Amino acid sequence: MAVSIQSITLLIPVYNEVAFLEKLLAKVDAVDFCGLQKEVILIDDGSTDGTRDILHRIDAENRPGYKILFHAQNQGKGAALRTGIGHAEGDIIAIQDADLEYDPKDYPPLLQLIIDGNADVVYGSRLSGGASSRAFNILHYFGNKALTFITNILYNTTLTDMETCYKAFRRDVLKGITIRSNRFDFEPEITAKVLKRGAKLYESPISYFGRDFHEGKKITWVDGFSAIAALIRFRFTD
């Protein structure tokens, strides 16, 4: 039985993305998110490259459906999302990175699974096949596979891509969870907590146009160890 879903909040954490932000927002504006009323929340996490100037201009334009939030200093993706979740009003809350690695046009099939009442949470998988994908750096690929494998062992599930950015949640599921992680360990923490609560989690294939470090990619091997620690920690605590 379908649940009553009328609106979506798209959370976009932003840190030093002056080269990509406006192109990304043009893509977001061009997508019909299954006819849902759309709220876009941009959370600047202490950018220093001119990104804040763009966001101040957007804020001054009073774009319908847009909220712009600012952190005084860089705290990390998890902290930015925690701030955004606190201001989100949509029936679905979804995540979009501010670069161009993910294309917003891939979101509607994920959202439809929630709209139809089949899922509480949907992840967009870069690794399940069925969509265009730039060839991974081999270390990134094996790192993602290893973290997903550890997730599946610890939480008795069959995910293909735990670390994906594209995550969509029914509002009542996400609002009931306290996020403690400040950095990229948000991904394993939220995965652990929705699985421990028995949420119906689905995956749907998405395209992926990954960046390399010289193109501005921020996550590093250090974050991989933090992710493993988070998976173990949140298996046994909240």
Image: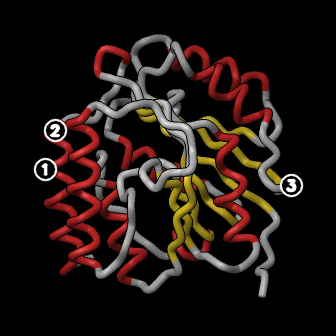
Q: What scheme was used to colour the molecule?
A: secondary structure
For the point 52% across and 31% down, the residue is: 98
Of mark 1 and mark 3, the one earlier in the sequence is: 3
Crowding at dot 3, Cα within 10 Å, few <14 / some 14-19 / many 20+, comes out as: few
**Residues at circles 1 and 3 in contact by the CB criterion of under 8 Å:** no
Where residue 49 sits in the image (x, y, percent)? 43, 12
- 80 or 156, which is in the foreground? 156
For the point 77% across and 34% down, the residue is: 29
Inter-mark Cα distance, 1 to 3: 40 Å
The part of the image, by quadrant, that contains residue 132 is: top right
Compared with 167, 12 (above or below) is above
Determine which residue is flagged by label 2.
221
Crowding at dot 1, Cα within 10 Å, few <14 / some 14-19 / many 20+, comes out as: some
Crowding at dot 2, Cα within 10 Å, few <14 / some 14-19 / many 20+, comes out as: few
Any part of residue 85 in sight: yes
Secondary structure under tag 1 reads helix
Secondary structure under tag 2 reads helix
Of mark 2 and mark 3, the one earlier in the sequence is: 3
Determine which residue is flagged by label 3.
35
Secondary structure under tag 3 reads loop
Where residue 205 sits in the image (x, y, percent)? 55, 54
Which amino acid lies under the numbered mark 1 shown in the image of this protein? Phe
Determine which residue is flagged by label 1.
225
Which amino acid lies under the numbered mark 2 shown in the image of this protein? Trp
Inter-mark Cα distance, 2 to 3: 39 Å
**Residues at circles 1 and 2 in contact by the CB criterion of under 8 Å:** yes
For the point 62% across and 43% down, the residue is: 41
- 131 or 175, which is in the foreground? 131
- 177 or 195, which is in the foreground? 195
